Amino acid sequence: MSGARYAEWKGWNSESFGTCSAADEVYFAAELRRAGVEAVDGSYILELGFGNGTFAAWALKQGARYSGTELIPALLERGRGKGYDVYAAEAALPDLVESSSRDLVVAFDVLEHCSETDVIRLLREAYIVLKPGARLIARVPSGDSPFGRAIQHGDLTHRMALGSSSVRQLAGETGFLVAQVREPAFPLLGLGAAPFFRRLAVSLARTIAYPVLRRAFMGGGDAVLSPDMVIVLSKPYRDN
């Protein structure tokens, strides 16, 4: 599928590029807090695959010093038109930004589009550009979960499914420490009364159902049964 057709299929257009809804703002703030990133004002952030520019818009609004990469030329053009500091994804990350210069690398819904070889390469490059102690946050369809199949197989460009065990393999291969492998943040507050009660009901249902499913079908453990999985990796202060 061509990049232009993919963007069209996703509903990404020039009018919606670089916009961030109230729900997106609440989500990104909650996700980063849960990952141990309390604030991004003044932080150097690199995003892999910025897509329609939603996270970029949020990060810049928060005062971050943002850079991003993207594979689709039309999206690169839109990013540059907005004045964003963005680059073609084909380039190696250490060729784009200085080593040990980034406080955070994010990849929302990106790694599943890559081969195993490309994921390892990206993580190794991200390791180089992150500061010691800094974090990488990625969101992918959960390979642990039967509920993740609709997402993983709902896009012809998805190539790799990642589960919690394979995340630990990747971390060992690339030098990262695994800080978190978990379900995405699901904030209850900040969106009004109706979303609060709807999300509360969903949260309660998951709290009851997921442990039962893990025990019944997986013998217990900590498999991530939400449709998506969030991975938080940390660069150690000293190389392993």
Image (spheres, rainbow, N blue to C red):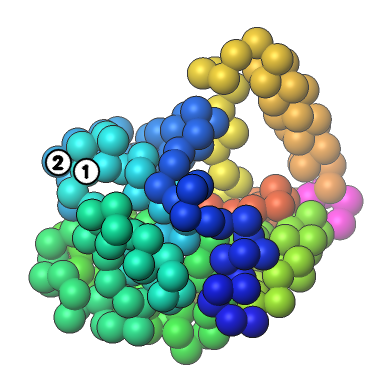
Which corner quadrant holds the N terminus? bottom right
Is residue 215 on the magenta stretch? yes
**In the orientation shown, which residue stands out farthest toward the top?**
193
* Residue at figure coordinates x 47%, y 61% from the top left: 51
Residue beneath disc 2:
42
Q: Is residue 11 left or right of residue 66?
A: right
Q: How far apart are marks 1 and 2 (CA)?
A: 5 Å
Residue 45 visible somewhere in the drawing: no
| 207 w.r.t. 221: above or below | above
As drawn, the label of residue 188 is none
Q: Position of residue 226 (x, y in %)?
A: 70, 48
* Residue at figure coordinates x 28%, y 62% from the top left: 80
Is residue 34 on the magenta stretch? no
| 172 w.r.t. 106: above or below | below
Q: Position of residue 154 (x, y in %)?
A: 76, 66
Q: What stretch is highlighted in magenta?
A: 214-218
Q: Where is residue 120 in the image (x, y as percent from the top left)?
A: 42, 81
As drawn, the label of residue 64 is 1
* Residue at figure coordinates x 42%, y 65% from the top left: 75
